[in-house]
Image (cartoon, rainbow, N blue to C red):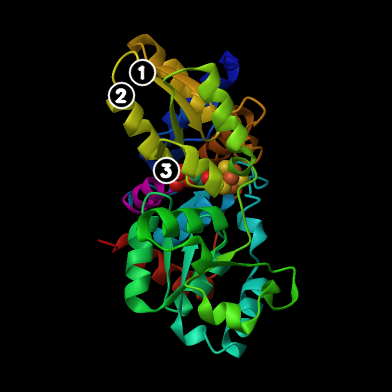
Amino acid sequence: APSDPDLVERARAAKEKLGNKVFVLGHHYQRDEVIQFADVTGDSFKLARDAAARPEAEYIVFCGVHFMAESADILTSDEQKVVLPDLAAGCSMADMATAEQVAECWDVLTEAGVAEQVVPVSYMNSSADIKAFTGKHGGTICTSSNAKRALEWAFQQGEKVLFLPDQHLGRNTAVRDMGISLEDCVVYNPHKPNGGLTAEELRAAKMILWRGHCSVHGRFNLDSVNDVRERIPGVNVLVHPECKHEVVAAADHVGSTEHIIRTLEAAPAGSKWAIGTELNLVRRLANRFAPEGKEVVFLDKTVCFCSTMNRIDLPHLVWALESLAEGNLVNRIQVDQETEKFAKLALERMLALP
Ligand code: 13P
Ligand code: SF4
């Protein structure tokens, strides 16, 4: 639906009033009505880097979800304020690993005698607490665009990886990019005693995958792929690595949101694409590439938007920008200093990956 012209004008006016004091970041899964006001758009890796590269902006308005705003706060100076237009924009995957659960897991690994060999690798989609745990235990953060390099680095530091919180990204990267077999991956379930694993299983495993997943990408399944291939002969199936292993194994191409966009940019006219990622992005890509004769469809019509990404809408953005323009700092996301210190260590290890 077209954006409300009154709200569009108000957002424009508030941004103009703020000038260089504000920098608006927009994740690819954001609504069109919000993305039109982003100074830069990107995947979570690019946005983390872009946030860090804007020291002159007093306010960073993050149109994305909570863990992204936390990461931006960690990577920017203390004087810069990061604002999340709706505090309810969380991430169900990030919520699947709490600090208490992860501390308990480390105790389990210690008791099994394997903790010393384990390097934690945490997906960007995790709370600042989990990033701090990762930094403290010599690990790194990764995103879907550098998970392979993060695992390569981690296996130079130790023999095993604890990958949190997305089991699918962990498994897909281990199996596809690292040549690790499915049998060498075990799943740690934080809701079971000892994670549901025996000490022998932990000793034998190479990848210990946290039992977390994305509630959006986890809904694509093998039928989604088979059905679209039947419906659209010659279609290329391109999915995000947060999808289940069976989906990734059946797809033609796999990659982060930036990778998906670049792949479509390079695709020849007349090619057909079924995309397995969030719907706001897929719709935008379908509209963008249709005039070039590239057909882009959503991998499975029964899957819907990421509801928390969608919490950031034009009314919330207008409210945040107008508040800032009037001198009211609203919805600031601020990570405490102790957490920030260790989380930053883990994030900087990621930024330094080759
Ligand atoms: P990327 O933008 O890094 O591909 O991440 C996808 C995602 O799920 C963000 O919430
Ligand atoms: Fe979290 Fe999935 Fe939504 Fe990304 S798309 S914010 S991983 S629930």
Q: Secondary structure at mark 1?
A: loop
Q: Earlier in the sequence, mark 2 or mark 3?
A: 3
Residue that numbered label 3 is attached to: 256
- Label 2 vs label 3: CA separation? 16 Å
Residue in front for this viewpoint, 171 or 340: 171
Circle 1/circle 2 CB separation < 8 Å = yes
At x 43%, y 63%, the residue is 141
Residue 44 is one of the magenta-drawn residues: yes
Range shown magenta: 40-53
Q: Report x, y in % for residue 181.
A: 46, 62
Residue that numbered label 1 is attached to: 271
- Asked if residue 337 shows in the view, the reply is no
Q: Report x, y in % for residue 300.
A: 60, 28
Q: Amino acid at mark 2?
A: Ala
- Indicate whether 228 appears above or below 144: above
Residue in front for this viewpoint, 280 or 333: 280
Q: Which mark is residue 267?
A: 2
What secondary structure predominates along the stretch shown in magenta? Answer: helix
Q: Is mark 1 within 8 Å of ligand 1?
A: no
Residue 236 is one of the magenta-drawn residues: no
- Indicate whether 277 appears above or below 75: above
